[in-house]
Image (cartoon, grey):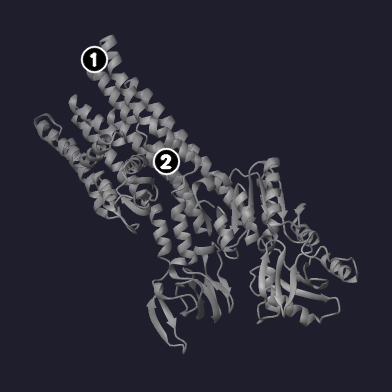
Amino acid sequence: MKDATISTYYVSDLDCADCAAKLESRIVALPGVTQASLNFASSRLVVRHSAAKATIESAIVQAGYKVRQAPPLAEKKKRYLVPFTAAFSFLVAFSLETQPLATLSTMFYAIAILIGGFSIARKAFYNLSNYSIDSNFLMVIAVGGAIFIDQWSEAAAVVVLFSLGHALEHYTLEKTRRAVGNLMALAPERATLLSDDDKQQDVDARQVKPGERILIRPGERIPLDGQVSAGISAVDQSPITGESLPCEKEPGSLVFAGSLNQNGALYVTVSSAYQDSTLASLARLTEEAQSKKAPIQQAIDHFARYYTPCVIIAATLTLLLPWLLFQEPFSLWLYKALLLLVIACPCALVISTPVAVVAALGNASARGILIKGGVFLEAFGNIRSLAFDKTGTLTHGSLSVTQVITDGSLSEKELLSLAARLEAASEHPLARAIRNACPDQTPADDFHALPGLGAVGRIAGEHYQIGSPRLVADLLRGDALEASVAAAMQEGNSVIWLSNESRLLGAILFQDTPRPEAAATLRELKDLLPGSIVLLSGDQPSTASAIGRQLGLSDIRAGLLPAEKVKELRNLQLQHGRVAMIGDGINDAPALAAADIGVAMGTGGSDVALAAADIALAGDDLSQLPYLIRLSRRTMRLIKQNIVFALLLKAIFILAAFSGHATLWMAVFADTGATLLVVANSMRLMKAQ
């Protein structure tokens, strides 16, 4: 058997979530297909298969749909020609219903049925041939039954309203489907490449490689991620980070593809390829997130799988029992059975969840929040406690060296030079601060990072180690050197120690400042969450406590290794229930993965942390956390509203049908109206604040 491959398709002309579920089941049933996932809201089909691609594409086309390799940026208007032509034919027939023109009227009703119903019948019988029943099949039965009892106007009304409703629903949903495509369209396809002698060349942005330089003129959008090498300007990066105000950029500042340069020329050294930019990753992961169903959506899909067959059984019993047992008129109970089929169509119910989830994901991505799936969106509203890392999360992480203390055997400059060589290959914030204070140092030999502790290496043949007090605990001796360091740490400084194999050589002190929004965000989170907010830090207890006090935190757990952070998280989960972890570094990755929800700082966070997290804050803005909790809870409320509304409306019309106060066209209008109202209610999430 050939190795399985993964292919992605975009399916056009999907009318409803129920149709999408049926097509997904059909694709899964194909020989050589091991897995298929079709997300109705994004029209994205992902297939794991060993079968030929032509086999999969043929099955999609046979089902009455179109297949593309990339998402369409705009839906062709001719898609709406069929339902509106059918509607016009219906209006003509209705105007000719006077007795002398009754035959002509019936002919136009038949034309409306043929035009509007061809696609419906095609999809219905395709699914039936694959032992699957969907809403299209329910409509075909309803139309056929109405014709059987000579209710041509009712049959035509069912077809026209059903096709018009799906066209309007499709138009509304297309706005959310275009969101990802519009996001990527923010990044220009052309870039001004600078040669070594600063000559300018207009090139395809996809050809620019990391390390090359580009020029961004005032008023231009930035095509690639990079670091400013020259120039000063204000940049609107709201599409990426959600920041409402332009950010000042100067040499050393990071810029993101899709951002708008406002008033100055910027010379930028490219840091990542076009397809690997922050914008591209945001678009790609947002699209992938739409396919990861929330638990409530999985429950609805499971329910709908058995719902339609049960409706058909109920309609059959509605027809047969009164007719056979009580000799009631066949045509009367056939009409009521048809009403039941139409009223019970599952479209509004099945669509109640995915549209709301996609609208919420789109809202979040517009604010610079990447949620990797509906399951995480739903879960975040249910968290009870939060655990925060300190450096780079609650603080800026832009540490600076404030003091160098030695034992007297080395000068401060020599000690700092040794430290810079040991930390030359490290990405830890403390290492960056040391390199900033003492740049251009030759890396130590045999460098080895010790996560949560520090690093070791060899310089001029001698072994050195640099890191936290735990790394050098056996060398701490309580003398004047340690007393001097302890006094400085009481003021909120962080410390790392430098030693050789036999003794401590000295310490380097650093200071960091809390993010400006951190204190207000933590106060707001305390009001939203029933559990506690905890600081989990690998830093010294005195330093962590100093920062914690500034932010109003009382539960501070410091001096933790990565494995100990995981242990503390487990304890929090046992004590409070669901816990979310917010962090940014490699040493936070195990805790991010162990938490019920992991949230990574997107700009400053490491790739490992971003991969382990379920949610990323692209703008590193902690104030988005309370918003995210409210968005999650509002999404779940709207989904429940949608479900209750859809079921309640069906119950009302079923009662009206059996009491003789409903007609077929009213039932279709109610079902279509319910679907549109559910979509409209869900799309309010796109504007949620």
Hey, which quadrant is residue 397 in on the image?
bottom right
Residue 46 placed where, x, y %? 38, 50
Q: Is residue 75 above or below residue 659?
A: below
- The numbered disc on residue 678 is 2
In the image, 532: left or right of 32?
Answer: right
Q: Answer whether labels 2 and 1 touch (C-beta < 8 Å).
A: no
The CA span between labels 2 and 1 is: 37 Å
Q: Which amino acid type is shown beneath numbered disc 1?
A: Pro
| Closer to the camera in the image, 504 or 586 | 504
Q: Is residue 98 above or below residue 502?
A: above
| Closer to the camera in the image, 646 or 560 | 560
Asked which secondary structure carries label 2, the reply is helix
Mark 2 or mark 1: name the one nearer the start of the chain. 1
The residue tagged 1 is 329
Residue 509 placed where, x, y %? 78, 71
Residue at the front extreme?
461
Give neighbour class at mark 1: few <14, some 14-19, many 20+ (Cα, 10 Å): few
Hey, which quadrant is residue 416 in on the image?
bottom right
